[in-house]
Each structure stands twice: as C-alpha cells, then as structure tokens.
Image: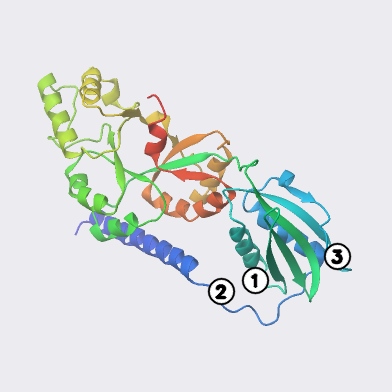
Amino acid sequence: MTKSSFYKNIALILFGTVVLLLIVNILVSKYVDKDEQPKHREVLSGIEIDKIFHTALANYGFSTNWIIKKKIKSISGDSLYSTYNVNVPNDVSIHSLLLELKNLFWEDDVEIDAEELANPKRTLVRLISDQKLKLAAELTNSDKIKREFGTIAFLVNDLPLKNEEVLKSFLITPELFYAVLTPRDEAKKRLSQIAKANKRYALLLDDNITELNFKLSSSYSDDKIKKSIREIVGTFYNAAFFIIDDRSDLFESEKYPLIKSELLKRGIVLVPKSRFEFLTSSKVNTGDKFQDFMLTVKKSDEKILMVNAQDFLIISSLIPAYRKIGYKFIYPGDIIIKRNF
C-alpha cells in the first residue's frame, strides 16, 4: 500500500466516523425523551421566567411586534410579573412553542399549564414557579403575520464515492441537498446507489474530466465532442441539471459553443457555477463560516450554497436551529426552475 492510498483510507475512515456520529446524534435527539426532571429544581422569579419566555419566542423568529403586554381577564396574583397577548404565525404550531418552553424550563421548578379557549380560539399559557403564577400569555394563531427569512439550498460535492459503505451512511443524511458529480466511471458506478437513497444529483462540467469516453477537449473534432456529449448525457440522463465551471479552460475554449448547443438542444438546463454561493475561505471553522453566510441571507433571498461533503455534515447539525427560526431549506432544483439561466 502506498503512502498516498494509506492516507486516503484514513481520511475515509474518519469521514465515515463523522457521518455515523452525526446520525447517532440526530436519532438520539429525535427519539430520546427527557423522562425524568432533576430532583432539586430551582425556583425562578418572574423576571427570570419572563426572560426565558421571550427566548422561546425568539428561537422561533418572533418579531417583538407580535408580543403585546396586555392584561388578561380573570388572571391575577401577587406574584404575577407579566401577561401577554402573543400573535403566532400560522407556520408555527402552538404545540411546538409549548415544547420549546418545556425544554427551556426543564431543569427549573416551573410548571407549564396550557388551556384551550374559544371565541376567539386561543391558548392560555400559565407559567408557575413555587406554586405561584408568575406569567400568563394568550397565544393566538394569525394569518396576518408571517416570519420573513430567506431560502437556502445545498449542492454537495466531493462525496466519498470510493467507499460504498461510507457513501451509504452519508446519503441517509436527512437534510435536503443535491449531490454534485463529475462525469467519470467512479460516479457512474454510484448512480443506482444515489437513486435508491432517493437523492438527486447535478453534473459538473469542468477541466477535471479525464476519462476518454467523457472527455471534452478543445483539441477534439466536432464529431468527437458530439460523441462525448452523447456518452455523458446517455450515462447521466437523470441529472437534475448540468453545471458549467465558467472559470475553466473548457468554458473559454472555442469548442464550448458547440458543447452548449448540443446540451441545450437535448433540453438540458445548464447553470454557470459562478451563480452559486460558496463559504468564504478563512481560518475560522466551518460552523462559523456557515453562520457568517446565514447573516448575508435576506428575507427575499433564494441562495444555492455549494459545499464539500465533510463541511455539509457539520452544517447539517446547525440547520434545524435556522429552520426553527423560519429559514426555509429546499432542493436546488426548486430554485433553478424559477430562474432564467
């Protein structure tokens, strides 16, 4: 075994370990309930409960304009710190908010009492500590408000194609994405595995196509270019769309107009790589870079982010928190079909 192949095997093992740990973490977070609260829980003041209550709403991206301090009939008490009327957007269930409160107050002596009321339909929530009512709020769903956050989709390249088991583990990652493949036999061998995992892919055309049956060279004749195109399209016919690296020699070559024409007449959507977003290179870790990227996503944005597989594993652990706030994560194809490329 060469030193190069040894290091590649080590990298694959580490990558597979990261995949498995992420999956275990997701399963544990999803299916393991906190059945027993701590025995000695701390009593909280009204100020502390009020602060945590606002945190729960902020975690779901609530505007402060939706939280109105208001007296509630039949609610009173010497220890009562605050009462609210909270408008809840329709894409957030009140049940989810109650679960969020339960989670935030888990280690504290806080009882959460929720009561469904009618005329109008609403939920009265009472937060009680040391058997004293500290906060009350009426939660009402409203179709007049909505959370306004951007939309993101992922293209994932550098998949571990050389290792079937590691790839299999990666493909069961629950977050939405399209794989990015380059025309080569190694990618061809994995097409059925990708399809069985109900994942889609996009095909990247760049200067790294080396295998003769797929190669697109400026030195080739028009007939040879057309033959390569037929081979590429025939093999990767299930690609959601094709990506052209518009900074490549291939794109700048005199043969590119022919390549583009051959693809377009087959009804293939061809997207310049420069239209996508990439994590900026820096010395900070992937999680920090992704959070910096999310700060650039405005409410009307629909951005497609291209990342490598290893970074995507890290990012996927952060996505649920952003989704809870109100960001939308969709397939890249849902954005591509809206745009005129």
Residue type indicated by callout 3: Ser
Res 106 label: 1
Residue type indicated by callout 1: Trp
Report whether 74 appears left or right of 149. Answer: right
Residue 283 in view of the camera: no
Image coords of residue 175 (percent x, y): 42, 52
Q: Earlier in the sequence, mark 1 or mark 3?
A: 3
Name the residue nearer the viewer: 184 or 317: 317
Report whether 266 appears left or right of 10. Answer: left
Could you tell me if the residues under marks 2 and 1 are in contact, i.e. CB atoms within 8 Å?
yes
Residue 87 in view of the camera: yes
Categorize mark 1 by other alpha carbons within 10 Å: few (<14), some (14-19), many (20+).
some
Q: Earlier in the sequence, mark 2 or mark 1?
A: 2
- Furthest residue in direction front, as rendered: 119
**279 lies above or below 77:** above
Name the residue nearer the viewer: 188 or 286: 188
**60 lies above or below 245:** below
Q: Earlier in the sequence, mark 3 or mark 2?
A: 2
Quadrant location of the N terminus in the rendered image: bottom left
Residue 7 found in image quarter = bottom left
Q: CA distance from mark 1 to mark 3?
A: 25 Å
Report whether 223 appears left or right of 316. Answer: left
- The residue at 14%/23% (across/down) is 220
At mark 2, the secondary structure is loop
Categorize mark 2 by other alpha carbons within 10 Å: few (<14), some (14-19), many (20+).
few
Image coords of residue 25 (percent x, y): 45, 65
Residue 235 found in image quarter = top left
Residue position for label 2: 34
Residue position for label 3: 76
